[in-house]
Each structure stands twice: as structure tokens, then as C-alpha cells.
Image (spheres, grey):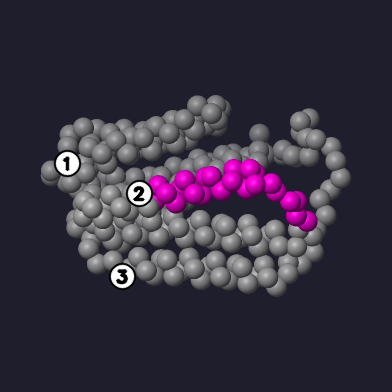
């Protein structure tokens, strides 16, 4: 076996283990080590890195089982530790810098477990590939597409800025979470609309339009209901 695949395997394991270990250390291990932490929360926090490391190694031979152990079991143990140690996660006791860096660690943890193309694997040579003509470029995007992207990004930044106007700690945490979700949805929707500018359109009947709007309207109603409950409780 050549040296390149060996180095690639080591880098792949590190890419899966290191971000998760950093996120675990910043957001799970530190709260679990506090004095008032539950013993069971410490047990769950201690088992989490074992699941992460063993899952990353097992995934080299058994990808599905390794992902179940390194992703599902690891995240599940971390969530269990948080649920058993909710007092340490009170917004008034959180360190903002450590929490932000831990969030970045969780982001890279998700990216590290993404599916990569194997060594020497050509996707076009796969026997399951459906033959057909190559995709042609649609050319340059119209000006309206760029305007849509700018408006979407500006709206996302405005939502993030509005979340910083919430002063109460508990409400501020919820506001930042909602603003982040709405901002991501706005950017994704804006990008989708921008890419479809200039594309041929098919007329949709009323039933198809209602079907496409069901999920966004349900999410909006759920967000409004959660906000109402939060307003009444707060």
C-alpha cells in the first residue's frame, strides 16, 4: 500500500475526531466537571469521546456502523449529559467565548463526518450511473438574481442584528436561535429563487401550490405558537 492512502486515512480520522473532541471539551466536559453536576451527567460526558473515537476508527471498515457510533451515539451522549446537567447550562453561567468556539467545533464536526470520495474512485465509472448527455451551462445569471441574493443576505444580517436588541438573558438565547434559523432559511430561499430566475417555468395548479406551501406555513405556525407560549410564560 502506498504512503498517500495511509496519510489520507490518518487525516480522515483526525478530521472526524479532532473537531468533535474540541466541541465536546468546550461544551460538554467543562459543564460536567462543575461541582453541582450530576454524576450521571459526568458518566454520559465521559462515554461520549469513547464513542467518537471508536466510531471514527470503525468507520474505516464499516462506514454505517461507524457513523452510528461516532455521530448518533456521540451526539446522543452529549445531549444526555446536557439534559442531566441543565443547571450548568443556564445562560447566566455560560461563557460566551467558550460557547461560541464550541459552536464552531460542532460545525466542523458535522463537516468532518461528510461523505468523501474514496481513493482512486471515479464516480463516472460506477455501474449505477445513468448514461446521458452532459449538463450545459445556463450562462450568466441575470441582474435580478444578484439583487435577490443581496436582499436575502441583507435581510439575514438584519435578523441577526435584531436578536442583539433582546436584553434578558433567557429571552436573548431564544432570540439568537430563532434569528439564526430564520437567517439560514432566508439565505437558502434567496439562493433558490436567484438560481431559478430565467429558467423555464411550468404552470402550477392550485393544489400543487398549496402542497408546496404546506411545509413553510406549518413551520411558520409552529414558530408563532412557540413564540406565543414563550411570551405567556415569560
Residue 8 seen anywhere in this rendered image of the structure: no
**Residue 165 image label:** 3
Left or right: where 2 falls relative to 163: right
> What residue is rendered at 76% in x and 31% in y?
128
Task: Say whether disc 3 or disc 1 marks the residue closer to the N-terminus.
Answer: 1
Q: Secondary structure at mark 3?
A: loop
> What residue is rendered at 79% in x and 64% in y?
139
Mark closer to the observer (3, 2)? 2
Task: Say whether disc 2 or disc 1 marks the residue closer to the N-terminus.
Answer: 1
From the viewer's side, name the closer residue of 90 and 196.
196
Mark closer to the observer (2, 1)? 2
Q: Which residues are magenta?
A: 200-223
For the residues labelled 3 and 1, the Cα–Cα distance comes to 32 Å
For the residues labelled 3 and 2, the Cα–Cα distance comes to 22 Å
Q: Dot 2: within a 10 Å radius of its alpha carbon, few (fewer than 14), some, or many (20 or more) residues?
A: few
From the viewer's side, name the closer residue of 193 and 215.
215
For the residues labelled 2 and 1, the Cα–Cα distance comes to 33 Å
In percent of width and height, residue 185 lies at 51, 56
Pointer 1 residue: 37
Amino acid at each position: 500500500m502506498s504512503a498517500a492512502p495511509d496519510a489520507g486515512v490518518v487525516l480522515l480520522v483526525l478530521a472526524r475526531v479532532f473537531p468533535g473532541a474540541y466541541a465536546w471539551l468546550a461544551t460538554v466536559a467543562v459543564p460536567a466537571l462543575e461541582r453541582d453536576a450530576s454524576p450521571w451527567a459526568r458518566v454520559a460526558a465521559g462515554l461520549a469521546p469513547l464513542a467518537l473515537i471508536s466510531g471514527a476508527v470503525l468507520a474505516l471498515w464499516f462506514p454505517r456502523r461507524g457513523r452510528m457510533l461516532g455521530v448518533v451515539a456521540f451526539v446522543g451522549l452529549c445531549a444526555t449529559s446536557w439534559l442531566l446537567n441543565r443547571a450548568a447550562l443556564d445562560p447566566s453561567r455560560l461563557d460566551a467565548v467558550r460557547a461560541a468556539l464550541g459552536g464552531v467545533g460542532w460545525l466542523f464536526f458535522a463537516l468532518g463526518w461528510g461523505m468523501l470520495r474514496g481513493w482512486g474512485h471515479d464516480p463516472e465509472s460506477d455501474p449505477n450511473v445513468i448514461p446521458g448527455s452532459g449538463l450545459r451551462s445556463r450562462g450568466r445569471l441575470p441582474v435580478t438574481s444578484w439583487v435577490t441574493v443581496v436582499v436575502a443576505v441583507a435581510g439575514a444580517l438584519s435578523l441577526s442584528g435584531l436578536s442583539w436588541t433582546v436584553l434578558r438573558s433567557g429571552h436573548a438565547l431564544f432570540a439568537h436561535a430563532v434569528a439564526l434559523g430564520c437567517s439560514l432559511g432566508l439565505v437558502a430561499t434567496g439562493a433558490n429563487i436567484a438560481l431559478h430566475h430565467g429558467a423555464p417555468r411550468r404552470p402550477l395548479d392550485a393544489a400543487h401550490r398549496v402542497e408546496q406551501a404546506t411545509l413553510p406555513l406549518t413551520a411558520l405556525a409552529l414558530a408563532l405558537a412557540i413564540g406565543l407560549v414563550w411570551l405567556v410564560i415569560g
